[in-house]
Amino acid sequence: AGIVTMSPWTDLTCSGESHKTNFLNDPQFGNTTDSMLYNCPYIGDADPMDPYLSPMFGGYGKMPPMLMQVGGNEVLLSDTLVVADKVRAACGKLRVSVYDGMFHVFQMALRLIPESQEAWNEVGAFLQIIYGIRRKPEGKVVRRVKSGRKK
């Protein structure tokens, strides 16, 4: 088992440092407090510090290996970095990748921007390690299988 996070929102109190330092840099959640981050009906009357709502306030013992990706321009940057520190303190296996200049869930741009492709390549490599997948170099036939169909 393993966990991959992409630009996670782990602190529904929006109290992290990057909520201030990246406020003018984040094209999705910056420059306004009129967004779902600050006006979240999901919370309702619950305590936003509840670890079931804001995982940042929870415990991180016995976690599977994690890959955490985040854009360097996100207001959610500190959400990832604080959780990463907690995972490290609990002796968890962790890789954190901060993609400089990138925005919230930049990975969804797929092949449109190089950083997105790089992020997906990183996810692929992580999953290969987690699941013990061994791949032969491209173009080399590993095994021929007859389909049973007539040509």
Image: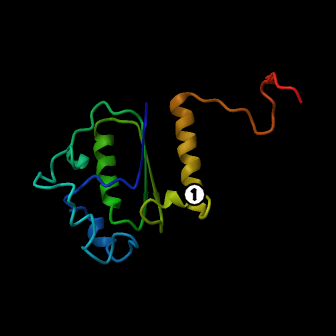
Residue drawn at (16%, 54%) of the image: 48
Compared to 72, does 42 lie above or below?
above
User: Picture coordinates of residue 91 (x, y %)?
Assistant: 33, 35
Relative to the observer, which residue lies in front, 148 or 84? 148
Query: Can you say which quadrant of the picture contains the N terminus?
Result: top left
Of the residues shown, which amino acid type is indicated by label 1? Leu
Residue under numbered circle 1:
110
Residue drawn at (28%, 76%) of the image: 32
Residue occupying the far right of the picture: 151
**Residue 147 location, quadrant:** top right
As helix, strand or loop, the secondary structure at mark 1 comes to loop
Residue occupying the far front of the picture: 150
User: Picture coordinates of residue 4 (x, y %)?
Assistant: 43, 43
**Residue 52 location, quadrant:** top left
Relative to the observer, which residue lies in front, 80 or 38? 38
Q: How is the image coloured?
A: rainbow
**Residue 17 location, quadrant:** bottom left
Q: Residues within 10 Å of mark 1 (few under 14, many from 20)?
A: some
- How many numbered tags mark residues here? 1
Residue drawn at (81%, 21%) of the image: 148
Residue drawn at (39%, 56%) of the image: 7
Compared to 3, does 70 lie above or below?
below
Query: Can you say which quadrant of the picture contains the C terminus?
Result: top right
User: Picture coordinates of residue 76 (x, y %)?
Assistant: 33, 61
Horizontal side of 9 relative to 110 (left or right) equals left
User: Picture coordinates of residue 57 (x, y %)?
Assistant: 20, 47
Horizontal side of 102 relative to 59 (left or right) equals right
